[in-house]
């Protein structure tokens, strides 16, 4: 399809919600209308909108004033994959899954949609694969608070999630200090520790436990003992996917209707129990959960989302097909959309922020660390 043949595009938001989605919808819609005279329709609730034909026009007015709003005006859904969609129940109670790609294609044809702008993470891009294979032109935009999408150095929503988690950790510091306690704070991130690492360093937290670095319980206990003999309190940030050495992730529940059925959660409480059992310290646990997904996007995410939205339309109008807009070395470019589908970008063990954190005494629970206050030289003022 030539760019001259593109008269109408659809835009959808899929997967988990995050700050900045509306900023992208706004940028995509305004760029398409103002610069290229293209009609825009919104597909409601992710891919389920294609399955059930829930499509509505998006005008310039519809997207005005939504830059600062959290969530998505189109709604989202993290359960629908057109190739694996629940369509019934067997006599034994098990769910029947079917390939409903033809229903999606029928909706696209019915509304005269020439291309789709799909906003989501690795699961969303994997879900788009069947439509790409069927010939639908899709331009993807990377969205995830976890920052774990392969091919891009950053995804919008991440910086706001870090800012929210950092503010919460800052507040936990004062109560931990006042009561001489250890407070364990569990944050989202699935199998990647980007939020835990970045918010942990930004807040000056004492220990960061993340999926990429399995922790040792004895090392945790020794570090906590050191902290309690010195400052007298400690903040421990735990990514929901963190694991003990030789152990497994803590699964909160299974969602049989989701393409990604594992729901992590509970590792914070598990770590708190370990600390309490191996030390004589009072421990409290806080789980931030979906708090880091909500609210107004920070300025950096608004700018990032606006750039991604503009570049998605620019890439489409250059004649590209099946591409994912990314940022690499602070430059906007695009890669094969399927190159990131179903993959996760984890924190490299040699990441500079890990090195810097270790240098200032932050523990990752994998090795002995910290300074014994009894060994520190006294200073007379």
Image (cartoon, grey):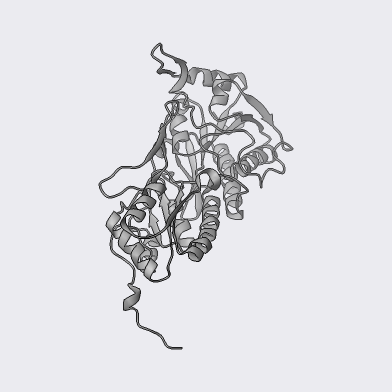
Residue 240 appears in view: yes
Question: What residue is drawn where x is 43% and y is 70%?
Answer: 231
Residue 361 appears in view: no
Q: How many labels were placed on the picture? A: 0
Q: Residue 205 falls in which quadrant of the image?
A: bottom left
- Foreground residue among 146 and 343: 146
Where residue 224 appears, as percent x and y from the top left, is 36, 62
Q: Locate the N terminus and report the quarter of the image it occupies.
A: top right
Q: Residue furthest top?
A: 91
Q: Is residue 27 left or right of residue 199?
A: right
Where residue 351 appears, as percent x and y from the top left, is 37, 58
Question: What residue is drawn where x is 61% and y is 54%?
Answer: 299
Where residue 350 appears, as percent x and y from the top left, is 33, 58
Q: Is residue 164 left or right of residue 281?
A: right
Position of residue 347 relative to residue 181, above or below, is above
Question: What residue is drawn where x is 68% and y is 43%?
Answer: 66
- Foreground residue among 76 and 379: 379
Q: Residue furthest left?
A: 246
Q: Residue furthest bottom?
A: 381
Question: What residue is drawn where x is 50% and y is 53%?
Answer: 331
Where residue 100 appears, as percent x and y from the top left, is 48, 19
- Foreground residue among 254 and 105: 254
């Amino acid at each position: 399809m030539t760019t001259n043949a593109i008269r109408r595009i659809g835009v959808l938001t899929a997967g988990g919600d995050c700050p900045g989605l509306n900023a992208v919808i706004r940028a995509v819609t305004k760029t398409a209308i103002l610069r290229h005279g293209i009609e825009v329709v919104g597909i409601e609730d992710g891919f389920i909108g294609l399955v059930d034909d829930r499509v509505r026009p998006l005008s310039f007015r519809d997207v005005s004033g939504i830059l600062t709003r959290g969530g998505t005006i189109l709604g989202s859904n993290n359960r629908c994959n057109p190739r694996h969609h629940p369509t019934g129940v067997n006599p034994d109670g098990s769910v029947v899954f079917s390939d409903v790609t033809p229903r999606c294609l029928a909706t696209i044809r019915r509304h005269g949609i020439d291309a789709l702008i799909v906003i989501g993470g690795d699961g969303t891009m994997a879900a788009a694969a069947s439509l790409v294979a069927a010939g639908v032109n899709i331009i993807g935009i990377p969205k995830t608070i976890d920052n774990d999408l392969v091919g891009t150095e950053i995804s919008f929503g991440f910086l706001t999630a870090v800012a929210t988690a950092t503010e919460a950790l800052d507040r936990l510091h004062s109560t931990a200090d006042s009561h001489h306690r250890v407070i364990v704070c569990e944050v989202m991130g699935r199998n990647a520790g980007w939020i835990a690492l970045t918010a942990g360093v930004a807040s000056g937290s004492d220990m960061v436990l993340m999926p990429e670095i399995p922790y040792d319980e004895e090392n945790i206990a020794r570090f906590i003992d050191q902290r309690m003999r010195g400052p007298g309190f400690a903040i421990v940030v735990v990514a929901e996917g963190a694991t003990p050495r030789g152990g497994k992730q803590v699964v909160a529940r299974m969602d049989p209707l989701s393409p990604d059925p594992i729901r992590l959660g509970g590792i914070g409480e598990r770590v708190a129990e370990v600390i309490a059992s191996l030390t004589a310290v009072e421990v409290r646990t806080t789980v931030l959960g979906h708090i880091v997904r909500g609210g107004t996007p920070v300025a950096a995410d608004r700018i990032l989302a606006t750039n991604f939205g503009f570049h998605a339309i620019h890439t489409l109008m250059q004649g590209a097909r099946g591409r994912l807009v990314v940022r690499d070395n602070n430059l906007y470019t695009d890669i094969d959309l399927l190159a990131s589908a179903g993959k996760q970008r984890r924190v490299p063990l040699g990441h500079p922020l890990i090195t810097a954190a270790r240098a200032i005494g932050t523990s990752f629970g994998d090795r002995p660390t910290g300074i014994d206050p009894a060994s520190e030289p006294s200073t007379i003022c």
